[in-house]
Amino acid sequence: MKPIGYWLNRTDQALTRRMDALLAEYGLSRLTWQVLNVVRATPGVADTEVHATLAANADTIALAAAVRTVLTDGWATRPATGLLILTAQGDARLAVVTERVAFFREEVIAGIPLEEYGTAVRVLERMTRNLEGAPVAAPAG
């Protein structure tokens, strides 16, 4: 059996490739999709908050480029310096994309009972918290 790190990396790469392919017809990538979801969840969100929320998903340069893309492509606008909101057109377009992504998510978890999916997510969350919050144990001996 391959270790969990192998499957985590492979799953993330597969999700990114498939989402990027799916979202390309809308002029989006997985990362720009994630930016738009943060903006939709918190209208008037600061760029710094977008970066903080998505820091685990990409570096600062990639996040800044994703923000520029959603602005340039008319998905979002700035009501004030450093803040983001969806445009009316962006909101309407995002509704269509969200519907398509929902079907994609169903494809991803096909054959996996929701209970198992929930268990997998909770285990990964605990592992992450263990790694991010606990000091590294010294070897015995």
Image (spheres, rainbow, N blue to C red):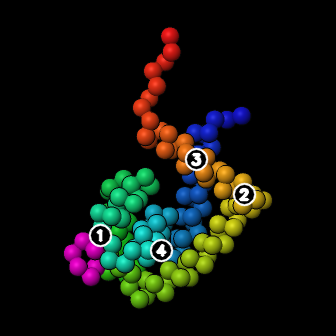
Q: Earlier in the sequence, mark 3 or mark 4?
A: 4
Question: Residue 87: x and y, percent?
Answer: 38, 85
* Mark 3 touches mark 2? (CB < 8 Å): no
**Amino acid at pointer 1:** Ala
**Amino acid at pointer 3:** Leu
**Amino acid at pointer 2:** Glu
Dot 1, how many residues are within 10 Å of its Cα: few (below 14), some (14-19), or many (20+)? some
Q: Earlier in the sequence, mark 3 or mark 2?
A: 2
**Residue at mark 3 to residue at mark 2: CA–CA distance:** 14 Å
Residue identified by numbered label 1: 46
Mark 2: secondary structure: helix
**Residue at mark 2 to residue at mark 1: CA–CA distance:** 36 Å
Instruction: Tell me what residue is drawn at x 50 percent, y 10 percent.
Output: 141
Question: Residue 11: x and y, percent?
Answer: 61, 50
Foreground: disc 3 or disc 4: 3
Q: Earlier in the sequence, mark 4 or mark 1?
A: 4
Bounds of the magenta segment: 78-83
Q: Earlier in the sequence, mark 2 or mark 1?
A: 1
Residue identified by numbered label 3: 124
* Mark 2 touches mark 1? (CB < 8 Å): no
Q: Earlier in the sequence, mark 3 or mark 1?
A: 1
Foreground: disc 2 or disc 1: 2
Instruction: Tell me what residue is drawn at x 50 percent, y 64 percent.
Output: 30
Residue identified by numbered label 2: 115
**Residue at mark 2 to residue at mark 4: CA–CA distance:** 34 Å
Q: Residue furthest left?
A: 81
| Dominant SS type (magenta) | loop
Residue identified by numbered label 4: 27
